[in-house]
């Protein structure tokens, strides 16, 4: 009996830790009862599909705590990698907002309940809708399934691959964000050069007065052209996960 309960507790700990920080599933807009029900159902499913790596019938309480802690750390590391990859579009949106002069704009994100910026939140919602429409949520189940193939329940995952995965994902997040925002940065750089030339050619023109609407208009136009790149990143994110997840 203790062996069965310990095995289910190990699986439940990893699944719960993973879905605790996971985008979409971890939103405050989703009721807690739904989260608990989905977590338990998935834990029961993986408990029937994934046998324990070793016999824990005589395991001590201290060893059980160590195993549970290892499952929690591994699940949180997997979820954190996914969160960092999801943050690419939001970070790109914030770079664009800074160029548009909208850094002071604040809204309350209805999904997370936290304060955010309007443009980055809009781009993130569009990206998540495209991700879900492409059945990207199935990728979360694939990640959990492959994690049990790499580290079956009852084994302690090594810290090295987890740290390398999180650090590598952080670097990839900044690189991908700058790459997505690069066309916008180039467009705003050209706009600044044009405004500087106008300031020299027409000194009586109030450049500071006309620069703000031009930056906002250019930003909105570039964001409209930016949407196809967001759609392309949906498929690219799956490739990043395959490379960075310690599976």
Image (cartoon, rainbow, N blue to C red):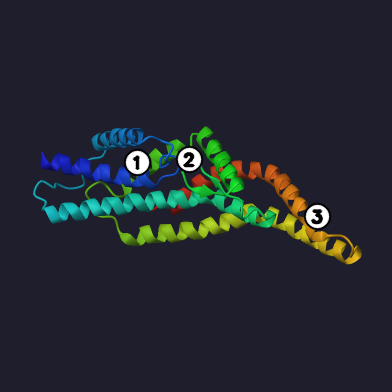
Frontmost residue, 126 versus 138:
126
60 displayed left or right of 224: left
Quarter assignment of residue 212: bottom right
46 displayed left or right of 231: left
65 displayed left or right of 1: right
Which residue is identified by label 1?
145
Q: Earlier in the sequence, mark 1 or mark 2?
A: 2
Q: CA distance from mark 1 to mark 2?
A: 27 Å
Q: CA distance from mark 3 to mark 2?
A: 35 Å
Task: Kindly check if marks 3 and 2 are in contact, taking CB atoms under 8 A apart as contact.
Answer: no
Residue 162 seen in this snapshot: yes
Which residue is identified by label 2?
111
User: Measured from the top left, where is residue 219 in percent x and y?
Assistant: 71, 49
On residue 210, the disc is 3
Residue 247 seen in this snapshot: no
Callout 2: SS = loop
Q: Earlier in the sequence, mark 3 or mark 1?
A: 1
Callout 3: SS = helix
Q: Residue at 14% across / 46% down in the picture?
A: 55
Frontmost residue, 139 versus 114:
114
Callout 1: SS = helix
């Amino acid at each position: 009996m203790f062996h069965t309960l310990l095995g289910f507790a190990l699986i439940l700990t990893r699944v719960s830790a993973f879905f605790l920080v996971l985008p979409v599933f971890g939103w405050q807009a989703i009721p807690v009862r739904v989260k608990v029900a989905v977590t338990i159902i998935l834990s029961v499913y993986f408990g029937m599909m994934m046998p324990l790596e070793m016999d824990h019938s005589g395991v001590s309480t201290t060893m059980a705590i160590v195993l549970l802690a290892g499952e929690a750390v591994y699940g949180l590391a997997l979820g954190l990698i996914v969160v960092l990859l999801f943050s690419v579009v939001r970070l790109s949106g914030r770079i664009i907002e800074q160029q548009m002069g909208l850094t002071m704009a604040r809204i309350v994100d209805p999904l997370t309940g936290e304060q955010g910026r309007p443009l980055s939140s809009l781009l993130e919602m569009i990206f998540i809708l495209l991700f879900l429409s492409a059945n990207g949520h199935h990728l979360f189940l694939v990640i959990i399934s492959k994690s049990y193939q790499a580290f079956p329940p009852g084994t302690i995952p090594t810290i090295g691959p987890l740290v390398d995965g999180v650090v590598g994902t952080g670097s990839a997040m900044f690189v991908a964000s700058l790459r997505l925002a690069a066309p916008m940065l180039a467009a705003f750089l050209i706009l600044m050069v044009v405004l500087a030339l106008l300031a020299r050619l027409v000194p009586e023109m109030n450049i500071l007065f006309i620069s703000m609407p031009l930056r906002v208009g250019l930003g909105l136009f570039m964001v409209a052209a930016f949407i196809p790149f967001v759609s392309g990143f949906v498929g690219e994110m799956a490739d990043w996960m395959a490379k960075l997840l310690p599976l």
